[in-house]
Image (cartoon, helix red, strand yellow):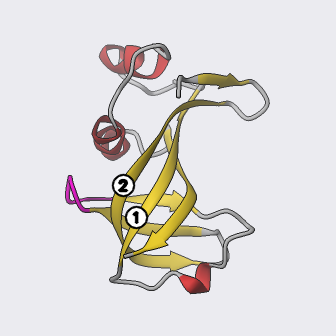
Amino acid sequence: MSSALNAETGWNFRIIDQRLIIIKTKNEKVRKAAVLDVITNLPFAINVPEDMALDRLETEKDYFAHIKVYTSKILDGVDKEYIGFFDALDVDQTMEDFIKAYWVYPNKIRFDLDSIEEL
């Protein structure tokens, strides 16, 4: 899938990818889970949709997840050498790139859980 602009939300859709993750913690109030990406061994936060029962996700369990990645349109505070990473919507970055960028700019990358399968 190619990237697309979403003028209503302030986020640019970038990719959807399949990842092997481990749920580390979850928070029902904010509809988020902290996950560990098995390939990169890096943790990140993921938004869980309202129509998905968060209680069905068990911690310390492996899941195969489809994850949508968005980058912020608001780039205040982003170093100029990284602006291209967020602005170049036609460049295909990998999921690993977005997970690593999340560690530098956590408020500029958003991960949304699209679907999940227990392994």
Give x and y (percent) for residue 87: 48, 15
Q: Which residue is mark 2?
A: 19
Secondary structure of the residue carrying tag 2 is: strand
State the predominant SS element of the stretch in magenta.
loop
Mark 1 or mark 2: whose residue is earlier in sequence:
2
Q: Is 103 situated left or right of 88 in this image?
A: left
* Mark 1 touches mark 2? (CB < 8 Å): yes
Which range is magenta?
Answer: 38-43
Give x and y (percent) for residue 80: 36, 14
CA–CA distance in space, label 1 to label 2: 6 Å
| Residue 29, quarter of the rendered image | bottom right
Q: Is 104 situated left or right of 83 in this image?
A: left
Q: Residue type at mark 1? A: Phe
Q: Which residue is mark 1?
A: 64
Decide: few, some or many residues near mark 1? Use Cα within 10 Å; few <14, some 14-19, many ≥20.
some
Give x and y (percent) for residue 5: 66, 22
Q: Residue type at mark 2? A: Arg
| Residue 96, quarter of the rendered image | top left
